[in-house]
């Protein structure tokens, strides 16, 4: 069972795994990439993953067999484990608890594709519904307070497998960056009586210069203070704090916005490594007037160095106005995008 | 002139450079590594860098010629520029100012060595004195409030040149991570009347299990909530908030502690890429009872992925107790370390 440990100065929590390594070079094994042609996420390999937690399946098919369209399994090397109590305790001035939580993998398609943008909109809708279903299910557990859905694409963004997938980590504490978003947006709300994200949407749509996509219900833009080149956020225009309360109509619209935004970034930057993360309110809150769920997409074309780590002060060599202009200009051939072959077939 | 832009939600500042790139693939040029044998930091190449700001020189030598022992020059590709006023302004809900500040390179030795641990202790003392001298000089400028000294070693840690060097970025605002350290340690001080770092030192020295080195005036340990495998902090045992107030005796002792700590990490992990950062109090403060300057050393053997970016919640596969035990056991042949040849001669 991993530990959760709290930094006594800034309150940042760290998951510390119990290592079985005996010498420093053993630690490298954890990070080695799988290079073989074998893919544990392809159909017919269902017994190579832990048993499924949820799957959207074709009629008449059996769990942990072929016939699924989206499949959720526990991470084989989980950062957190679901069993047991938290055992919160101190060690002198330090605070810690057991690493209770969930770490799941969402296999987005049985096809060995390497990007979610290669899925059709109806297929992406099912992925977005799985995200919602898992959050709704896990928030019933009173030990858990936060669910983070994220996606790593490419080794430079931390991915170890090519077959397109997302991950879900559910934690017993609110992560520090989310906490800062919550307190920052609450402070703005107290001062101005409005949601800071709603204000951003209003200003971005009005000025247009950082807009990537603008649909009736969603907007994608490169934020004013982008940390990374081509960083892009997707927000629902109607105020909503919890992703898991998303409605079917919004899922349908979001699937197209997500597909096009990712496809534009992939086209502009020639298939970069990237991460996306769904930022949503903690489990133990009702609908919040001051917080607004959104998706942050961060291409990994620069690598943060010592200065960024030490200061939280990023250097971004590409102004978001230029990035957005490039992304707006990218022409997508939707038909072609859907039919792109994968780089490697499993 | 770059912009400084503030994220309206969490208050994080970003340096946004004005790009001259015309197409997305042009941006890559910024990050391309120099691979040729030519080294602009070697003696005889003084005209390949901007003119020196400070150098410790042998008697009778001329500025911007050979004969220096440590040399400070402006960064050729600065993130911030020293000329002009801040021009603080708003753009709707967003805050910004001009990117005024300093970005300097400290060339630690004329020898083409790739690690500060290859320098002798007297040579490292001169580097530590240069750090101090530059902070003392730059804090006279009322536009500037924070000086961050850091070091990137290896491409995976953001270094573009091999010849051992450090950097200094001086900013007109306090970076968010430093602000969080300041407010977190102030809160601890209000509650318990003590410096949280002094408490950490007391507990680490008493329990010993995370100690790497323990000398009369300094302690090096792997912190309880280490974000990265083999993360190691060096702290002065006597409370002090500002690095630039360091005394000569302490410089002498710190040079040995820094050299040995880096050499142990290099030996244990086989010359990893790493960063170190000196965390010190802002320029516009007097000696602070609640803050404690220190050096954080972060080997780059894992790469943070989407989860870490989104949450500030790190996953560390190596418990700090194990890392510290490995580092304590590393035997250094001091003589040999000093005489190690560089990987490549300039």
Image (tube, coloured by chain):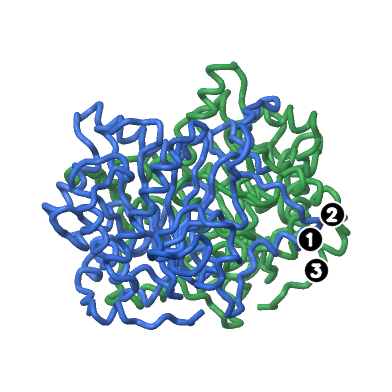
Chain colours: A green, B blue
Q: Which residue is mark 1?
A: A267
Disc nearest the viewer among 2 and 3: 2
Left or right: residue B58 compared with residue A63: left
Q: Quadrant of the N terminus of chain B?
A: top right
> Visible in this render: residue B300?
no
Q: Which residue is mark 2?
A: A330
Same-chain status of marks 3 and 1: yes
Q: Residue at x 31, y 59 (%)?
A: B232
Q: Earlier in the sequence, mark 2 or mark 1?
A: 1
Residue A117 % position (x, y): 74, 58
In the rendered image, the residue lying farthest to the left is B206
Between the C-alphas of marks 3 and 1, the distance is 12 Å
In the rendered image, the residue lying farthest to the front is B60
Q: Which residue is mark 3?
A: A340
Residue B196 % position (x, y): 24, 39
Residue B324 % position (x, y): 24, 64
- Secondary structure under badge 2? loop
Residue A131 % position (x, y): 59, 49
The answer to whether A33 is drawn above or below residue A212 in the figure is below
The answer to whether B346 is drawn above or below residue B9 in the figure is below
Between the C-alphas of marks 2 and 1, the distance is 7 Å
**Residue B304 or residue B270, whichever sits in front:** B270
Between the C-alphas of marks 2 and 3, the distance is 17 Å
The local crowd at label 3, few if under 14, some if 14 to 19, many if 20 or more residues have their Cα within 10 Å, is few
The local crowd at label 1, few if under 14, some if 14 to 19, many if 20 or more residues have their Cα within 10 Å, is some
Q: Earlier in the sequence, mark 2 or mark 3?
A: 2
- Secondary structure under badge 3? loop
Is disc 2 in contact with disc 1, using a CB cutoff of under 8 Å? yes
């Amino acid at each position: 069972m991993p530990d959760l440990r709290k930094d006594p100065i800034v309150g940042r929590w760290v998951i510390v795994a119990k290592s079985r390594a005996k010498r420093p070079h053993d630690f490298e094994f954890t990070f080695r990439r799988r290079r073989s042609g074998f893919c544990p996420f392809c159909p017919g390999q269902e017994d190579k993953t832990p048993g499924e937690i949820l799957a959207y399946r074709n009629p008449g098919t059996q769990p942990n067999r072929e016939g699924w369209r989206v499949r959720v399994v526990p991470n084989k090397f989980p950062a957190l484990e679901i069993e047991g109590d938290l055992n919160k305790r101190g060690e002198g001035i330090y605070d810690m608890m057991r690493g209770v939580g969930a770490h799941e993998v969402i296999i987005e398609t049985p096809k060995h594709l390497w990007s979610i943008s290669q899925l059709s909109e109806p297929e992406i809708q099912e992925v977005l519904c799985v995200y919602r279903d898992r959050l709704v299910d896990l928030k019933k557990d009173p030990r858990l307070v936060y669910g983070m859905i994220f996606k790593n694409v490419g080794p430079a963004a931390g991915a170890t497998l090519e077959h397109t997938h997302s991950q879900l980590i559910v934690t017993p504490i609110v992560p520090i960056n989310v906490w800062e978003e919550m307190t920052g947006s609450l402070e703005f709300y107290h001062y101005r009586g409005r949601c800071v994200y709603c204000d951003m949407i209003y200003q971005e749509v009005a000025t247009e210069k950082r807009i990537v996509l603008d649909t009736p219900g969603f907007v994608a833009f490169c934020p004013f203070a982008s940390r990374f080149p081509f960083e892009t956020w997707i927000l629902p225009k109607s105020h909503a704090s919890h992703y898991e309360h998303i409605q079917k109509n919004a899922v349908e619209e979001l699937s197209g916005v997500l597909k096009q935004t990712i496809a534009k970034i992939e086209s502009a930057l020639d298939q970069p490594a990237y991460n996306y993360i769904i930022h949503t309110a903690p489990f133990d809150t009702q609908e919040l007037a001051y917080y607004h769920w959104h998706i942050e997409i961060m291409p990994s074309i620069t690598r943060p160095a010592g200065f960024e780590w030490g200061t939280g002060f990023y250097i971004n060599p590409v102004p978001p106005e230029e990035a957005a202009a490039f992304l707006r200009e990218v022409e997508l051939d939707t038909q072609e995008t859907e039919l792109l072959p994968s780089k490697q077939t499993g």
